[in-house]
Amino acid sequence: MLSKKTKYGLKALTFLACQKDKQPVQIAGIAAHENISQKFLESILLTLRKTGILGSKKGKGGGYYLIKDPSEILMTDVMRVLEGPIAMVPCVSLNFYEKCDDCPDENKCAVNKLMLQVRDNTLKVFRNNTLADLIN
Amino acid sequence: MLSKKTKYGLKALTFLACQKDKQPVQIAGIAAHENISQKFLESILLTLRKTGILGSKKGKGGGYYLIKDPSEILMTDVMRVLEGPIAMVPCVSLNFYEKCDDCPDENKCAVNKLMLQVRDNTLKVFRNNTLADLIN
DNA sequence: TATTATCCTATTAATCTAATAGGGTATGCA
DNA sequence: TGCATACCCTATTAGATTAATAGGATAATA
């Protein structure tokens, strides 16, 4: 199941990508428009800023804005930042690999074999979609 | 993340599919071989039996066994029984569809658009794999 | 210097998962 | 018949994770 964090984050990014000018948009505005708890959204946007996906400006007239063009914001990056590993099990994860304690041989493991295929296909989707692809 | 329930369930099914004869295998045996808590596995196998994937036999010489040939056990069925919905959000789920409270128009929703693609691809993988495909 | 709006940490409530406990029930065999 | 075996079933609990909240610190603008 997709976390609300990721869902809200994606909605916020979409909203920002739809702005005509590149003026900062306030948290309160995004939260109101997307029906999101403002405080919760605050922490999500903070994460997106710290990982270089968003920029921010403090004080009056401040807010959040996209640093890059929507067509350069890959879903692989967004998903990894918000949702974490793309793979459903650590033993098939590219960026968060971990060996299973219980599994003696990954190559003979049915779970590994199945989840490897799922990961490949999910990754293909995320690599194939930028923020720009989602707003049309 | 894949739940342990699903992981253990898949491992148990694989183990059963690898048995030469069709004799029932005891929970204790499966649990020991796959490093799984016996009691936890018990409830998982019970679920698989109730949904028609496994058969069971009580008393001495009893245990669990596959009802169908491994090549006829689809991963779509196994995953839905053990893990629940295949989709990451209810609004793109085939078998567990639910509308989002917050979302005014699914067709314009970026999350919907992205997760629809993920669901399609994951479904393709699960439809393309039977238990037999995982044990070679 | 007052106002605005982000920044940051800590805490809590709610939910879900994994595991455990304890006894009930049917089967097979001597 | 009686006993051992092994599944059947419900309830409970511990732990982890997620979602949300609270409260103030910091920086920018006018």
Image (cartoon, coloured by chain):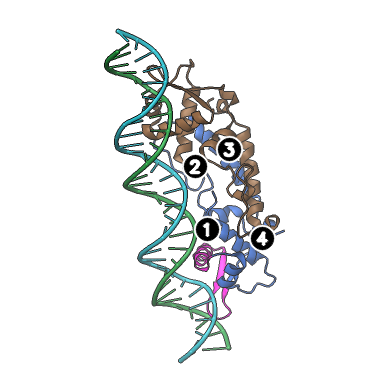
Chain colours: A blue, B brown, C cyan, D green
**Mark positioned earlier in the residue sequence (3 or 1):** 1
A114 vs A68, nearest the viewer = A114
**What kind of residue is marked 1?**
Lys
Callout in the foreground (3, 1): 1
Badge 2: few (under 14), some or many (20 or more) residues near its Cα, within 10 Å? some
**Residue interval drawn in magenta:** A37-63
Q: Are marks 2 and 1 in contact (CB under 8 Å)?
A: no
Reading the image, the residue beneath label 3 is: A117
Specify the quadrant of the image occupied by residue A56: bottom right
Place of residue B57 in the rendered image (x, y in percent of width and height, measured from the top left): 44, 20
**What kind of residue is marked 3?**
Gln
Reading the image, the residue beneath label 4 is: B104
Determine the CA span between mark 2 and mark 1. 19 Å
Determine the CA span between mark 2 and mark 4. 30 Å
A118 vs A37, nearest the viewer = A37
**What kind of residue is marked 4?**
Pro
Name the quarter where the C terminus of chain A is drawn. bottom right
Q: Can residue A78 be seen at all in this image of the molecule?
A: yes
Rendered view: C4 above or below A84: below
Residue A5 marker: 1
Determine the CA span between mark 3 and mark 1. 26 Å
Q: Are marks 2 and 4 in contact (CB under 8 Å)?
A: no
Specify the quadrant of the image occupied by residue A65: bottom right
Q: Are marks 3 and 2 in contact (CB under 8 Å)?
A: no
